[in-house]
Image (tube, rainbow, N blue to C red):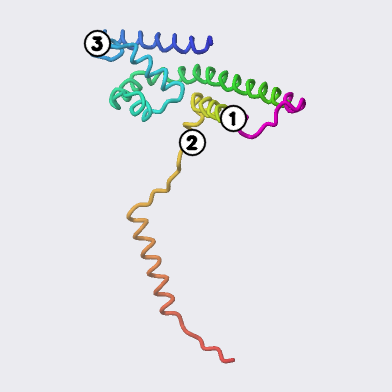
C-alpha cells in the first residue's frame, strides 16, 4: 500500500508546513497542538468522508472540521489525488476477488458440489459497489454532482401573476359567437 503511505506522508508534510507557518505568526492552531488529530481528520476527509460524517461519526466539532479544511485548502487536491489511487486499488482488488470467487463457484457448480444462490455473491457485490462509490468520492467525482435550481424573484412572480390576469381578462372580454347547427 505505497499510495496509502504516500498519502499519509503528504498529510504529515502538510501539517508540518501549516504548523510552522502558524508558529511564525504566533497563532494557536490544532496543527501545532494536536497534529495527530489533524492527520486523522485530513486522512478521513481525503478518502471521501463527508464533513457531516466527521462530526457525527467521528466526534469532531464542526468548527474544527471547517477550520482544519480551510487551513489545508491548498493541499486537499493533492490529498484527493493520492487517496483516489488508494481507493482505485481497493476497488480493483475487490473486483479481482469477486472474479476469483465467481470462478470457484463456477468450478464447484460444474462438479455438482455446490448449487449457488444469489446470496453467495450478494455481500461481495455490495462491498464492490461500496468500493466503487468510495473510489469516485475519493477522486472527487461523486462530489461534483450538483443540483441546479431555478431561482425566481418577487418580480418574476408578480410578472407571472400580471400575465395570468391579463390572459383571464382577454378571455372574459372575448366576443362570444353563437354557431347554429
C-alpha span from label 3 to label 1: 51 Å
Confirm whether the magenta stretch covers residue 115. yes
Instruction: Please state if 96 lies on the left or on the right of 76 as rendered.
Output: right
Q: Which residue is mark 3?
A: 25
Secondary structure of the residue carrying tag 2 is: loop
| Left or right position of 92 against 5 | right
Residue range in magenta is 107-125
* Residue at which label 2 appears: 145
Residue 141 is situated, as x and y percent measured from the top left of the image, at: 51, 29
C-beta proximity under 8 Å, tags 3 and 2:
no
Residue 111 x %, y %: 77, 25
Name the residue located 40 percent from the left edge and 65 percent from the top edge. Answer: 163
The residue singled out by tag 1 in the image is 125
Give the mark nearest the N terminus, 3 or 2.
3
Badge 2 density bin: few <14, some 14–19, many ≥20, Cα 10 Å: few
First reached walking from the N terminus: tag 3 or tag 1:
3
Amino acid at each position: 500500500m505505497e499510495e496509502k503511505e504516500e498519502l499519509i506522508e503528504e498529510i504529515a508534510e502538510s501539517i508540518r508546513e501549516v504548523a510552522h507557518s502558524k508558529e511564525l505568526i504566533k497563532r494557536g492552531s490544532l496543527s501545532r497542538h494536536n497534529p495527530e488529530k489533524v492527520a486523522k481528520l485530513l486522512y478521513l476527509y481525503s478518502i471521501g468522508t463527508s464533513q457531516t460524517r466527521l462530526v457525527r461519526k467521528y466526534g469532531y466539532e464542526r468548527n474544527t472540521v471547517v477550520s482544519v479544511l480551510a487551513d489545508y485548502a491548498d493541499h486537499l487536491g493533492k490529498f484527493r489525488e493520492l487517496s483516489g489511487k488508494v481507493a482505485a486499488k481497493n476497488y480493483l482488488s475487490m473486483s479481482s476477488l469477486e472474479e476469483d470467487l465467481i470462478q470457484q463457484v463456477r468450478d464447484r457448480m460444474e462438479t455438482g458440489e455446490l448449487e449457488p444462490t444469489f446470496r453467495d455473491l450478494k455481500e461481495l457485490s455490495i462491498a464492490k459497489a461500496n468500493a466503487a462509490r468510495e473510489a469516485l468520492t475519493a477522486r472527487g467525482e461523486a462530489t461534483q454532482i450538483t443540483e441546479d435550481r431555478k431561482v425566481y424573484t418577487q418580480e418574476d412572480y408578480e410578472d407571472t401573476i400580471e400575465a395570468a390576469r391579463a390572459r383571464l381578462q382577454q378571455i372574459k372580454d372575448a366576443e362570444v359567437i353563437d354557431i347554429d347547427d
